[in-house]
Image: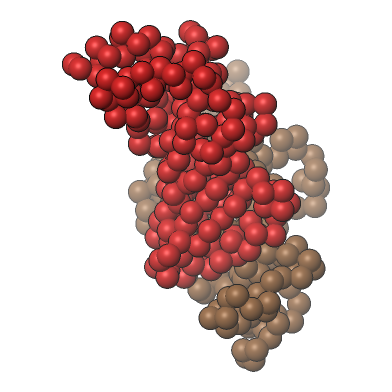
Chain colours: A brown, B red
């Protein structure tokens, strides 16, 4: 844990000195909110870089209208990708910090590039891949159309029990449907 | 004061000073007298080919604690005749200073947006209803009035002799200069209506 790495913010008192003026190379990795070198960096689906604490605060400021601070594309915690550099001076797991940074998401290779309009836009189209409480991925992705909720809810919350209830309903609907198919 | 706000203002100040626009003296930013840098003074020049051309407009900028998550509070210190700016208070109606603010915007983009607002008024979203009405219904009078205000308040160099004469006329009747100008501007430079207005 050395504290005097080049990426650390450094002394802030001598603001008029030249030390803060970023070289062109560093400007590339500046957070679009605090304009400092991004720490606990995340990138939005539209490709804009932020510190996770900065972006988190921006999303908290406007919970009802979450847009990218740079390009105003739709943005949400779930659609942000954390960036892990090599040999970072800070070895603490950023997810243990507050606010927690969103975790990286791994999708199956065959899904790559197959979905037009994936994850973008105002429609709130959301892929769910059948994880979490939904046993039927097809139902999950169908019923998540225009649903602003960010993915499966945490256990114990009202949303969770609601989703559990819904999943049971879907399960019974599906069973009845297959039963009907067998009879017909 | 939140540290992020102070840090950002310092960086933004440099950004404006180094900008091409500052080099062409289109925009300018001054540290206020306050030590914490949360009150600044901006300057924009009136865009060419507008009634504000040649004018210099001073802006009061106040940085909120929650900057940059909330927009800076900006108003015109220099009096101006514009549909989206109050001729009485200098309050500005501009979406990016309200709900369209985004945290990646800076004082430089705010100053440039205000300059763009001078070049393209939006009378359908007015701050000053009287000015907006004149802009729509009597565009020639609006243009002359705005030009006259630029000369009177913003160091503009294009005179509008007819209007200056009318102001002088009302001043001769004992009315204060600015009040006379406001009354005349509000009444499409009809001296009788303006006088009635001043006496009522
Ligand atoms: Zn940041
Ligand atoms: Zn973006």
Q: Residue furthest front?
A: B172
Rendered view: A87 above or below B192: below
* Residue B198 visible in the shown view: yes
Can residue A47 be spotted in the picture? no
Along the line of sight, which residue is nearer the eye, B54 or A73? B54
Location of residue B157 by image quarter? top right
Q: Is residue A33 above or below residue B74?
A: below
In the visual, does B162 lie left or right of B52?
A: left
Q: Quadrant of residue B29?
A: bottom right
Quick one: B14 or A168, which is closer to the camera? B14
Q: Quadrant of the C terminus of chain A?
A: top right
* Residue at image coords 53%, 58%: B30
Indicate the position of residue B130 as horizontal and vertical percent values: 38, 18
Q: Residue at x 55, y 48 (%)?
A: B43
In depth, the one of A93 and A10 nearer the eye is A10
Q: Quick check: A42 left or right of B31?
A: right
Tell me: residue A53, above or below residue B181.
below
In the rendered image, residue B97, in percent from the top left (x then y), is placed at: 48, 41
Q: Quadrant of the N terminus of chain A?
A: bottom right
- Residue B54, image x, y percentages: 62, 35
- Residue at x 62% of width, y 26% of height: B50
Residue A40: x and y in percent read: 61, 69
Left-right relation of A74 to A170: right
């Amino acid at each position: 844990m050395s504290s005097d790495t080049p990426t650390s913010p450094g002394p802030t008192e001598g603001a008029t000195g030249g030390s803060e003026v970023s070289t062109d190379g560093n400007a590339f990795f500046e957070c679009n909110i605090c304009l400092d070198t991004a720490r606990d960096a995340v990138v939005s689906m539209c490709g804009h870089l932020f510190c996770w604490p900065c972006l988190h605060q921006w999303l908290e400021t406007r919970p009802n209208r979450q847009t990218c601070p740079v390009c105003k594309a739709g943005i949400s915690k779930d659609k942000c990708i954390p960036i892990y550099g090599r040999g970072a001076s800070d070895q603490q797991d950023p997810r243990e910090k507050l606010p927690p940074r969103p975790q990286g998401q791994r999708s199956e290779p065959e899904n790559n590039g197959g979905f037009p309009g994936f994850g973008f836009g105002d429609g709130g189209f959301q892929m769910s891949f059948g994880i979490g409480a939904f046993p039927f991925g097809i139902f999950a992705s169908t019923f998540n159309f225009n649903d602003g909720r960010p993915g499966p809810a945490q256990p114990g919350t009202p949303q969770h029990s609601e989703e559990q209830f819904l999943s049971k309903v879907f399960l019974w609907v599906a069973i009845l449907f297959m039963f009907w198919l067998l009879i017909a | 004061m939140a540290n992020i706000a102070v840090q950002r203002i310092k960086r933004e100040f440099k950004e404006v000073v180094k900008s091409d626009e500052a080099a062409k003296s289109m925009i300018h930013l001054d540290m206020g007298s306050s030590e914490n840098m949360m009150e600044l003074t901006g300057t924009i020049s009136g865009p060419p080919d507008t009634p504000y051309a040649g004018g210099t407009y001073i802006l009061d900028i106040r940085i909120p604690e929650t900057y940059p998550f909330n927009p800076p509070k900006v108003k015109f210190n220099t009096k101006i005749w514009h549909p989206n700016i109050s001729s009485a208070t200098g309050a500005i109606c501009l979406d990016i200073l309200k709900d369209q603010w985004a945290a990646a915007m800076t004082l430089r983009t705010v100053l440039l947006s205000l300059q763009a607002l001078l070049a393209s008024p939006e009378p359908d979203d007015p701050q000053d209803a009287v000015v907006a009405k004149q802009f729509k219904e009597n565009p020639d009078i609006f243009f002359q009035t705005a030009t006259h205000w630029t000369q009177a308040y913003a160091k503009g160099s294009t005179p509008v002799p007819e209007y200056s004469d009318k102001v002088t006329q009302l001043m001769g009747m004992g009315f204060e200069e600015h009040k006379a100008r406001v009354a005349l501007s509000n009444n499409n430079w009809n001296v009788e209506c303006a006088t009635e207005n001043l006496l009522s």
